[in-house]
Image (spheres, rainbow, N blue to C red):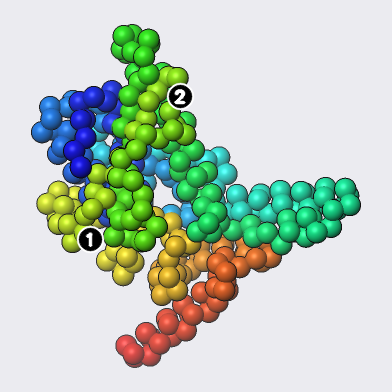
Amino acid sequence: MLVDLSSYDLILVNESGGKDSQAMLTHVVGLCDAAGIDRWRIVVVHADLGRVEWRGTRELAELHAKAYGLRFEAVSRSEDLLDQVISRRAALDRAADKLEAEGKPDEAAKKRNAPAWMSMSARYCTSDQKTSQVKKLMTRLVVEHRTRNPGTVFRPVRILNCLGLRKQESPARSKKPEFEVDKSATNGKRHVDRWLPIFGWSTEQVWSKIRQSGLPHHPAYDAGMPRASCVFCIGAGREQLVLAARLHPELAAEYLAVEQRVGHSFKPGLSMARIIELSSAAQVGTQDETA
């Protein structure tokens, strides 16, 4: 769909370092150039997930931004994802203790048994580690923009928030609106629209755009991973997680330690202990084949 890019004060492009957001960045820059939009109005943001994302991801996202002469911002939560899992477990246990003290054993048991890990139905990895941090950046950008452009003090600053989601990725994503007002990010000082510029693209279109750009993609793809953001994504299948454990054994060990500490499996029906076991077996099999 076509969007009037010239109607926005700022265009925020979310760059995870993965193939979709990389292709989206190139696409959006091309659209802005064609529309005569000054590149200073485009800001590339990367939600830095620290140790749980693939090595070199932040650096790659910054390289992509700098290649187009764009401002790059990295945002992050003070507590990384694994630490957040531990804190969540502690908070659930405190809530359970309180309920038990109030004579509510059934409610306490529910809290005690609630999983501390994120899941497809409780994706706080996205909401807390990414979305909330990007909103904080929006607040800062609005202050900066109003300082440089006093005329915008008397109206909301208009922000177009671009994300590289594609409907081909999953049935759930196919139901997302391609364009909508982001009511949770909009307030009296800013109006935020959320746009998915490559929503209808195929995987081949994504790779074609990347080849066209001439910019490097993340090496995780060359290693066999279909996606690159979190090393151990809750949305990944068993084969992908086993491969990730082979490629990142030290991080798998950290996940295992957290798994043991909080007393719940990383994914329902698939523990990190089992993932590591499968990755070790696969590694032995590969060595036997090459011996």
Q: Residue at x 20, y 26 (%)?
A: 6
Query: Mark 2 falls on what kind of element?
Result: loop
Whether residue 54 can be seen here: no
Give left or right: position of 229 versus 222.
right
User: Residue 233, percent across and down?
Assistant: 45, 61
Tell me which amino acid carries mark 1: Thr
- Residue position for label 1: 203
Give left or right: position of 243 versus 197.
right
Q: Quadrant of the C terminus?
A: bottom left
The image shows residue 196, relative to residue 275, as above or below, that is above
Q: Residue at x 30, y 45 (%)?
A: 178
Q: Residue at x 44, y 33 (%)?
A: 183
205 or 84, nearer to the observer:
205
Residue 163 location, quadrant? top left
Q: Residue at x 14, y 48 (%)?
A: 213
- Residue position for label 2: 187
Whether residue 49 can be seen here: yes
The image shows residue 74, relative to residue 158, as above or below, that is below
Q: Quadrant of the N terminus?
A: top left
The image shows residue 97, relative to residue 255, as above or below, that is above
Residue 159 location, quadrant? top left
Q: CA distance from mark 1 to mark 2?
A: 35 Å
Q: Residues within 10 Å of mark 2 (few under 14, many from 20)?
A: few
User: Residue 49, percent across and down?
Assistant: 46, 48
User: Which mark is on residue 82?
Assistant: none
User: Residue 7, percent across and down?
Assistant: 23, 24
Q: Depth-wise, is mark 1 or mark 2 nearer the camera?
A: 2
76 or 146, nearer to the observer:
146
147 or 135, nearer to the observer:
135
Tell me which amino acid carries mark 2: Asn
The image shows residue 161, relative to residue 98, as above or below, that is above
Query: Mark 1 falls on what kind of element?
Result: helix
